[in-house]
Image (cartoon, grey):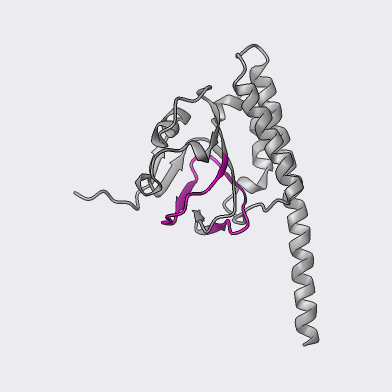
């Protein structure tokens, strides 16, 4: 019987997600930073609809890909950041081109005993209603990548009593920068839209 491709494939753990992508086991079972270039499984062999049990923060370079998120789509023509919460359905359109970037996976258990868990709901970009990718300038991209680098370096360091605290601090820095950049994007888009209305009224 042909498998129903419209049924989401539920991924409960980060280790399970790594296995799905053909990646080695994560360095930490509850948090991982994935480089898309390391994914060896052909894109057309990956599930097209997923239901993840963890947070996912991804930066994708410019690509024709459109990712369905809830009932709408993220558009990555210019590259940008996207944010997914546990138990949100995401799906990708069929494409042949590979894309590049990074994705940060955070299981809720990793931040469960930290104030960050209760603050996650304050980051509105994790909501289905925020269906626009966060487009970042070159300068903002370097900031995001520097935080990714810090997280990767910490995950590659021997785990000690401070490892979790440090990684969570970097995650919070990443989310706060994202909040700042979203605010900038909103102001920029609002100004551009207002200018368009003025020009239409003049015409």
Q: Is residue 114 magenta?
A: no
The quarter of the picture where residue 130 lies is bottom right
Task: Give the left or right position of residue 21, taking residue 200 as reference.
Answer: left
x and y percentages locating residue 55 in the rendered image:
56, 37
Residue drawn at 74 percent across, 70 percent down = 193
Figure check: 192 above or below 89: below
What is the tally of numbered marks visible in this picture? 0
Residue drawn at 54 percent across, 30 percent down = 107
x and y percentages locating residue 25 in the rendered image:
45, 25
Task: Tell me which segment is drawn in magenta.
Answer: 73-102
x and y percentages locating residue 36 in the rendered image:
52, 40
* Residue at the outermost bottom position: 203
Q: Is residue 80 magenta?
A: yes
Task: Give the left or right position of residue 80, taking residue 184 as reference.
Answer: left
Residue drawn at 35 percent across, 45 percent down = 45
From the viewer's side, name the closer residue of 92 and 10. 92
Task: Give the left or right position of residue 120, taking residue 103 as reference.
Answer: right
The quarter of the picture where residue 77 lies is bottom right
x and y percentages locating residue 157 in the rendered image:
62, 17
* Residue at the outermost top position: 161
Figure check: 146 above or below 69: above
The quarter of the picture where residue 12 lies is top left
Residue drawn at 51 percent across, 40 percent down = 37
Q: Is residue 113 visible?
A: no
Q: Is residue 40 visible?
A: yes
The C terminus appears in which quarter of the rendering?
bottom right
């Amino acid at each position: 019987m042909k498998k129903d491709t419209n049924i989401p494939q539920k991924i409960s753990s980060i280790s399970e997600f790594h296995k799905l992508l053909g990646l080695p086991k994560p360095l930490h079972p509850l948090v991982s930073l994935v480089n898309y270039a390391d994914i060896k499984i052909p894109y057309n062999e990956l599930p097209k609809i997923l239901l993840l049990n963890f947070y996912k923060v991804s930066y994708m370079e410019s690509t024709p890909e459109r990712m369905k998120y809830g009932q709408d789509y993220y558009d990555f023509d210019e590259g940008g950041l996207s944010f997914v919460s546990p138990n949100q359905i995401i799906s990708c359109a069929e494409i042949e081109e590979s894309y590049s970037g990074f994705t940060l996976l955070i299981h809720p258990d990793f931040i469960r005993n930290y104030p960050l868990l209760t603050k996650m709901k304050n980051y509105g970009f994790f909501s289905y209603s925020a269906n626009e990718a966060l487009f970042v300038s070159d300068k903002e991209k370097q900031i995001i990548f520097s935080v990714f680098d810090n997280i990767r370096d910490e995950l590659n360091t021997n785990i000690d009593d401070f490892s979790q605290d440090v990684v969570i601090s970097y995650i919070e820095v990443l989310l706060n920068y994202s909040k700042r950049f979203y605010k900038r994007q909103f102001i920029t888009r609002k100004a551009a839209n207002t200018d368009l209305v003025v020009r239409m009224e003049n015409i």
